[in-house]
Amino acid sequence: MMETILSIEFTAYVAFAFLLYAIRQASNLPNRYIPIVAAVLGVAFSILESSAFSFDVLINGLRYALYGIGTVATIKYALEKGEDR
């Protein structure tokens, strides 16, 4: 279990989520555009990671985007709940 948490792949997901969160905070981008930005950046990151483009690379990039969006939503929810207390 600990090897999975500390793996390079998990670290990439976390870094991607923080990148999305930073873009969201710095640019005041409306929430409806965040998934589009995440998909484009996720696929681009996956292409850079594998140095090729294929269907598997596209799916991996979309997985990065989904995990990143979920992580950003979790961070946002946790921060909002922390302010309410």
Image (cartoon, grey):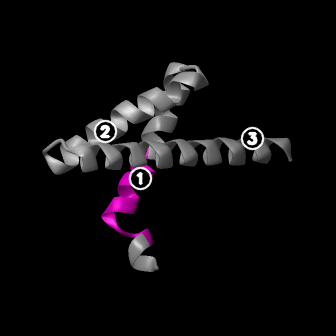
Q: What element carries label 3?
A: helix
Q: Which of marks 1 and 2 is nearer the N terminus?
A: 1
Q: Residue furthest left?
A: 51
How many residues crowd mark 2 within 10 Å: few (<14), some (14–19), many (20+)?
many
Distance between mark 2 and mark 3 Cα atoms: 29 Å
Residue at image mark 2: 43
Residue 60 locus on image (x, y percent): 33, 50
Which of label 2 and label 3 is nearer to you? Answer: 2
* Dot 1 amino acid type: Tyr
Give 18 or 68, whichever is nearer the viewer. 68
Distance between mark 1 and mark 2 Cα atoms: 13 Å
Res. 82 mark: none
Residue at the image point whose x is 43% and y is 28% from the top? 37
Residue at the image point whose x is 40% and y is 34% from the top? 39
Please report contact status of discs 1 and 2: CB closer than 8 Å, yes or no.
no
Distance between mark 1 and mark 3 Cα atoms: 22 Å
Residue at image mark 1: 13
* Dot 2 amino acid type: Val
Residue at the image point whose x is 38% and y is 58% from the top? 11
Task: Please identify the dominant SS of the magenta region.
Answer: helix
Residue at image mark 3: 80
Residue 22 locus on image (x, y percent): 48, 34
Magenta segment: does it hold 31?
no
